[in-house]
Amino acid sequence: MPNLISCDYDAKKIYVHSGISATITTSFASPSTYPRGLTLDGVNLISSDSDADKIYVHSGISATITTSFASPSLEPRGLTYDDPIVIWYAAVNTPQNVSATVVAL
């Protein structure tokens, strides 16, 4: 089962949950002061921070940052990833009844 990953603006942390539950298996400090958005590219966590106005690419799901760059606007608050393979994999491998339509872009 995949794990939920969440960020906490006040605690300045990123949490990895056990499945989709309130149980936290691990956590680590956000790379800056106000984490606001998360996505996964299939391997690496990508986070945004509304104080630094940056987007960070993590090494796997860890505090280690491999690269970062300025957000195209102020206070980035949400991220998503549009790779159809990642979307298909997530839809097929979730325990709930989920359907997805993969559209080539």
Image (tube, rainbow, N blue to C red):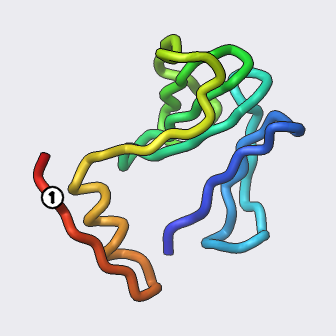
Query: In the image, is residue 15 above or below residue 49?
Result: below
Query: In the image, is residue 51 above or below residue 93?
Result: above
Farthest left residue in view: 104
Measuring from the top left, give residue 14's x and y in whole percent.
Answer: 71, 43
Residue placed under numbered mark 1 in the picture: 103
Q: Please indicate, yes or no, whether residue 68 appears anywhere in the rendered image.
A: no
Q: What residue type is labelled 1?
A: Val
Whether residue 11 sits left or right of residue 26 in the image: it is: right
Label 1 SS? loop
Look at 67% across and 69% down and name the residue there. 18
Look at 80% across and 38% down and name the residue there. 9
Whether residue 4 sits left or right of residue 27 in the image: it is: left
Look at 65% across and 23% down and name the residue there. 75
Query: In the image, is residue 45 above or below residue 64?
Result: below
Look at 57% across and 64% down and name the residue there. 3
Measuring from the top left, give residue 68's x and y in whole percent.
Answer: 50, 16
